[in-house]
Image (cartoon, rainbow, N blue to C red):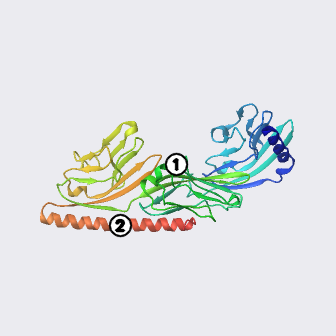
Amino acid sequence: MKSALIGVLFLLFAIGVFGDAETVSVIEGESVTLHTGVTEILRDDVIEWRLNGNRIVRISDSIKPNGAYNDRMKLDKQTGDLKIPNIKTTDSGQYTLKITSTRGSSEKIFSVNAVKDPKFDGVTVVAVTDGDSVVLHADTEILKDDEILWKFNGTDVVAKMKKDEHIFSTYDDIADGIFIGRLDLNYQTGNLIISDIRSKTSGLYEVNVKKSTHTIHKAFNVTITDKLNRVSVKEGVPVILESGVTELHRDDLVRWRFEHEDILAKIYKKAGISSTYDDVPDGRFRERLKLDHQTGSLIITNTRTEHAGLYHLDITSNRHVIFRKFVLSVCGSDYVTWIVGCVLGVLLVIASAAAGVIYYRYRRIISTLRGEI
């Protein structure tokens, strides 16, 4: 019965579903899937995809790739759909789908246009302050029969929308309940709103906008960038720069940097790495750095005024990306040095805060230009 139904669908598909070329416009770096329109390939079906007349891939009894496109383009073995990940402008052109079998043959044409966007590299990085909210944009015209699916870290479905079936759902009870009370869906645009972002809810978000002929894929790396943490300490006293996490996971990569360049410490349990680099810059940290191997916090023993400055912490993994900044002020042990050290520390804090405001305004300008606000 199933095969007979598929055969009827195929005949309907062959006699007139194709029509003119379907236009598909995407931004370079995004991914797109071109749909054959069939739910299952039958034994005697032969499916062939061509780009500007050159064969990309062919399915008969087995997949037989052809040409340089084999490394990137993916073929669905069940439906014959063609997925083009991380599309490039050179992938633009006319894609022709041909299906032949004992029941007849048919063709379908897609005119794919990949346009350049210098601000896009495949995954959009969205930096959010801990506790703030963020809107992830589907950025496409939503038609009544389109299906929108949002995923978190590649597996967990967090939201789904399909207007013609009256489906507007968020699934905040997944992933140990970390999204409870934090998810909303814009019913008009399909945009995903995440409230009260924390380290556990940062990470990779993907949206698939499935249309009748193709699917648009977008990815967002939501990262946490903390407000400046201001720490003051008297010279000679140890100080702990807290990572903010209670326990590191095996695949977390922890990196501490001083000012903008010098790496002070690194932890990567998966590779057995746990190191401090106290000889940079100019040896001022020599024999003064320690790491908390459970939390990734950095300990500076016997602090000196020369240790004052801006510290960066990055914690990255497949689950999340955490950015934190610390402005450390070290006050001298004697009265004069104490006054000078504290004044310099305050000035450093003011300068760092000003830099943060400038960066924030810059991000807002860029976001406005991109239509994100």
* Disc 1 crowd, CA 10 A, few/some/many (<14, 14-19, 20+): some
Which residue is rendered at x = 75% and y = 45% of the image?
36
* Disc 2 crowd, CA 10 A, few/some/many (<14, 14-19, 20+): some
Q: Quadrant of residue 326?
A: bottom left
Which residue is rendered at x = 25% and y = 55% of the image?
307
* Front position in the image: 177 or 59: 177
- The quarter of the picture where the C terminus appears is bottom right
Indicate whether 8 appears above or below 148.
above
Q: Mark 2 or mark 1, which is nearer the start of the sequence?
A: 1
Left or right of residue 116, residue 338 in this image: left
Residue at the disc numbered 2: 353
Can residue 177 be seen at all in this image of the molecule? Answer: yes
Indicate whether 273 appears above or below 170.
above
Q: Position of residue 130 (x, y in %)?
A: 41, 60
Q: CA distance from mark 1 to mark 2?
A: 33 Å
Secondary structure category for the residue under label 2: helix
Q: Residue furthest left?
A: 334
Q: Position of residue 172 (x, y in %)?
A: 52, 55
* Front position in the image: 16 or 145: 145
Q: Nearer the viewer, mark 1 or mark 2?
A: 1
Secondary structure category for the residue under label 1: loop
Q: Could you tell me how many numbered marks the image carries?
A: 2
Residue at the disc numbered 1: 153
Which residue is rendered at x = 44% and y = 66% of the image?
360
Q: Position of residue 32 (x, y in %)?
A: 66, 50
Left or right of residue 8, residue 204 in this image: left
